[in-house]
Every structure is written in C-alpha cells, then in structure tokens.
Image: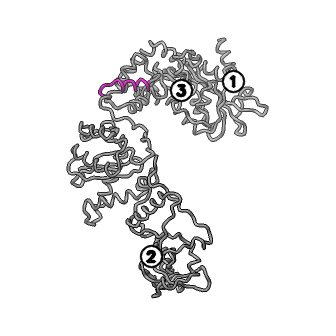
Amino acid sequence: MCNNFVHSTVKDLITSEQVLCHYNPELPVKLACDASPYGLGAVLSHIMPDDSERPIAFASRSLTKAEKAYSQIDKEALGLYWGIKKFHTYLHGRRFTLMTDHKPLVSILHPQKSIPAMTAARLQRYALFLAGHTYDIEYRSTHNHCNADGLSRLPLSSSATENYIDEASVFYTSQLEKLPVSSVQVRRETQRDPILSEVLDCVFRGTSKLPKDDVFKPYRNRETELTCHQNCVMWGNRVVVPETLRTTVLEELHDGHLGIIRMKNLARSYVWWPNIDSNIEQMCKSCVGCQTTSNMPKAAPVHPWDWPTTPWDRLHVDFAGPFMDSMFLIVVDSHSKWPEVYPMKSTTTSLTIEKLRILFSQYGIPRQLVSDNGPQFTSKEFEMFMKQNGIRHITSAPYHPRTNGLAERFVQTFKMSMKHAKGDNRNRSLQEQLSVFLLKYRTKPHALTNETPSKLLYGRNLRTRLDLVKPDLTGKVLESQNRMKLSKHCSATVREFTPGQRVMVREYRCSDKKWIPAQIQDQTGPLSYTVDPGHGILWRRHTDQLRPTAVDPTTTVSPETLQLPEPAIPAISIPSTIADRETMLSRQVTSSTRPKGTPATKSPSVPDVASSRRYPRRENIHPPIKLDL
C-alpha cells in the first residue's frame, strides 16, 4: 500500500504543471537522450527566456534482446534515433538541439561534417535518418545528464516484440556467413584471443579506454569506428578476425590467385586485422605459382647513354628485317645521329664485317660499337675483328632491346618511312627510296640535338633541292660584275697581247712624252703585263696602259729617257718556265760565290745607269741554297 502511494505521488509530481510545460513553437527545443545496457531514455524540453530548462515530455523503453548485444556507441546512437522518432511530431520541420553524453557521436553525427568512411553500417543508417532533420548536436557530461540517464536506467517494459530483427543485424550475419570460417568460430576465438577479448569488452561497455600498449594501437586509432555484433568485433562492415583464424582467411582470399590488388579489394569488403595488407603481400610473394607466372615489373626510368663530344666516337648497329624482301644493316653515329643503311641478302658474320670495313674506310674507325646479342655480333670472328681495329664492343642485355635504343628507334623510323614511300605510287626502286630517305633524314634537324646530322658530322649542311628556293648570293654578284663589264666607261672587249708584240706603253716620268714604244715580255695576270721599253729595265703595266703599235722600241729610245729609269720593279724578268728558273738560280749562285773585288761582267746591251738613279740601289740578298746545319 505504501509503495503504490509513493508511485502515484511521483507520477502526479512529474505530470503536474509545476514540472511539465506546454509546447511552444516560439521557444527553443532540446532533446536529451541516453542509453544504459538495458534501456533507453529521452527528455524533450524547452529553453525558457531565463535560460532554464522545462520538460515537455519524458520517454523510456527497454532494449530488446538483439539491441542489448549492441556496442555502447551503437546503443547511444540508438537512443538518439529512437528519441527523434518518438517526438517526431514536435521536432520535424524546425531546428532543435540534441544532447548526448557520448562524445564520439558529436563528431560522427555532426550535421556539418561528413560521415567517416569506416563508420559502422548501423551508425551510417542512423546518420542518414538524422540528415532529414535540422538540428545541432552538443556534448553534456554524465553528471549533468541525469534526467535522461535516470530514465534509461529505470525503463518501461518494451512494447516492441522480442522477435524484432534489425536490418544491420541481417547484413552483418550475411557477411559472417560468407567467410571461410563460421561466425561461431569467430565469436569463440575472439573471446579466447587475449587482445580481441579486451577490445570486445571495451567496445561493448563503451566506458573504459583501451590500454596504451603498442599491440592495441591499431584498435585505439579506430576506437570510435569499432562496434560489436554477436560478440564479434566489427570495423565498419568488416569482421576483425582473431589471430588463430587469419591464416585460414588468407588462404581463402588467395584461392583463385587473383593477385595482390584484387585480394586487398576483396578483403576490404569482409575482414580486417592489423597489418592485413602486408600479410596479403607476403602471401602472394611466397606463392610459387604466382611468382613463376607473374608479369614483367614496371620499366625502369630511362638512363641515356653519355653523349660523345666528337663525331664517329660510338656507333650503334642493328639489323632490320626481313623487310621488303631484304635485310638491312643499320649503323647510327651517337654524336651526330648520322645513319648508314646497307641492304643485305644475307646476315652472316663475314658479310657484316665486309660492310663495316667499307664504312670504316669512308668515315674512320670508332672507339666503341654497341650492338645486341645477335649471332653475327657474338661470334669469334667478329670479336677478333673488333680487337684488330681497337674497338670496344658493347652488347646490350639479352632480350632487352631498349639498351640499344638509338638503333632500335631508327629501325622503327626507317621501316615506317619505307612503308609510306612504297604506297605513294611513284614506282621507285628500293635503292632510290633508300637514297631519298637517307638524304632527307641527314638534312633534317634531329629532335635531340636540334641540329642536322650532316652539320654535326661534316660541319656543314648538305645541299638539297629545297636550297633552290633560297636566293643565291653568288649568282647576284656575278650578275653585278657582268653589268660592270658592260659599263659605258669601259670597252666592250678586252685587249690581249702576246709576248714579243710591239706596244706603246704609258710614260709617267716626264711630261713631254705620254707614250713610248715597248715590247711585251710576259703576261703576269688577267690584265697585267711586263714590258721592255728597250733600256734593260722591265715595266709592269695594266692593259689600259698599253696600245698595239708598229714602232720599233730599239730605234726610238732617247738619251734623256735612258737617264730616267723606271723605279717600279727591279731589272729582273720573271721566269716563265722551269728552265728559266734554273738558269736564274745558277746565275745567283755564281754571283754569290764570286771573290770580293772581282768586277762583274756588264751586259753589252744594258748601259750603266747606276750614276743616274734617284734612289740608291737595293742589294739583292738571297738565302743559301741549302741550310748547312
């Protein structure tokens, strides 16, 4: 009787107007929710103008058998979810504030933040439900959360049926049934595992923290994302597998030999444990079947050859074909990129050496020669040929053509060009197509050097038909010179004279005679001559200073003219033949060996005019015939 009185009295006090207040749409609304291991509680209240809280309604219920197996974070989220559904009539369409004493939910269910990727499926479903409402979420410590906490610890009997099945429970059960081990084994081994059993206890209670040991660090980093279902630890939708079952799960994941990437993608849909990725990689690396049939690894970065500083220092050789009913010996200079192509019907070692001998006779012997491991280049005969010529022979790695990339790339260019030339319907022969290709390639700037191969090899560009397009400076100069020849100030024809011809030569020493007779001795240039005016001294005159005449120069020389010799050139004629040069040389030797004081013999036809010279005579000092060392 006393208990009934107390119960009725408490009920009357809770529902009295002193405690409850009427709902006012103009006042702010708060919803405080809490969960205990066996019940849920919710309090809907108004924030009054004096910042005090007045409750509008209370609600509580007991957890079902399935809900009691939830982890503590799932129970707290369930309390928020159930409270909003309970007071949907008051909250829908307006802003309200959610109050919880479980701090991780503030971040997971925050309306301004995205849902963490590894959040449990149940929490994601609750977050999607809350996304349809306008709310703010705040944290309140348990000491200040007594109203909702008391209702959760003294819940009403649940009106929900005990046979209620949660959608998330169906999903988790289906995930566990797909594993190579049953959920019963996972549950049993989880409880036996010293680490997972403690993790399960912390997740289930939601109040204690995980130890700070290193073995718990992977679980501490995911503490807010871990949950439990049927006494199995879950990370999102992935089952945390105990250590005793991990080898069996790895073998099941590797069944089918799908490779490392596919194994990881498959595992991320079902299971997880610390260092699972490294365990999967080690599983694949230790599988004999996977290792013996795996693909090639990713190609290494390109390591270019050292660029020689001089042409024809290192050559790269290779064979192209069979192509167009023939084989082609390809040789490329590494410095200038100058190519040489030799069509060959056979690729024996002797014929290869013969072609290389022809090539070396034209351009010289290189220091290095790079080739693949073809039988022509690895034979003893070819090795001896390299040693005899002092060439260092470098071979590429077997079955790795990229090492000899310069020759291999030119082979590709050569084949492409020859195929295109074959289809242009010009009916060219193979040799003609090859010649045209080589000329174009040698005169085209290379993509690597930005210079033509001919420029780097010869120091000049080869002349092609395209050079006809450019203006020719030589032709322009010749044309201007021809116009100068036809000038009105010059004669249209060039006067030519022969040795011995009588001419009148221009006189520049006296003013009374403008021309005097002379005789042509020799032609020293296109328009220059040496003439003999008859007094033993030769003059040099231009053709403009000469006129043909019939006057004999020996009969018209006056004494006054002989007293004024021409100072232009010495009185020695230029020898025109080898015999004349030998005669002159013998005279010089004779004069140099004459004893001192012996007078020289005067020529009877040349008068002595030394006393009448205006300037002193220059002594002709000749070097000795042979240097006596």
Task: Say which quarter of the image contains residue 400.
Answer: top left
Q: Badge 1 is on which residue? A: 14
Task: Provide the residue span drawn in magenta.
Answer: 276-290
Q: Nearer the viewer, mark 1 or mark 2?
A: 2
Task: Look at mark 2 in the image and give the residue it sits on.
Answer: 521
In the picture, residue 154 is in which quadrant?
top right
- C-alpha gap between disc 1 and disc 3: 38 Å
Q: Earlier in the sequence, mark 1 or mark 2?
A: 1
Q: Tell whether 187 sits left or right of 353.
A: right
Picture coordinates of residue 35, whole percent (x, y) = 59, 22
Where residue 423 appears, x then y in whole percent?
28, 62
What colour scheme governs how the chains and residues are painted in the rendered image of this protein?
one colour
Q: In percent of the image, x 38 and y 44: which residue is there?
A: 314
Q: Amino acid at mark 3?
A: Glu
Element type where label 2 sits in the image: strand
Q: CA distance from mark 2 to mark 3?
A: 119 Å
Three-letter amino acid code at the position of disc 2 = Gln
Find residue 32 and name its label. none
* Mark closer to the chain start, 1 or 3: 1
Q: Badge 3: how crowded within 10 Å, few (<14), some, or many (20+)?
A: many
Q: Main secondary structure of the magenta part?
A: helix
Q: Secondary structure at mark 1?
A: helix
User: Does the magenta-highlighted stretch encompass residue 562?
Assistant: no
Residue 288 drawn in magenta = yes
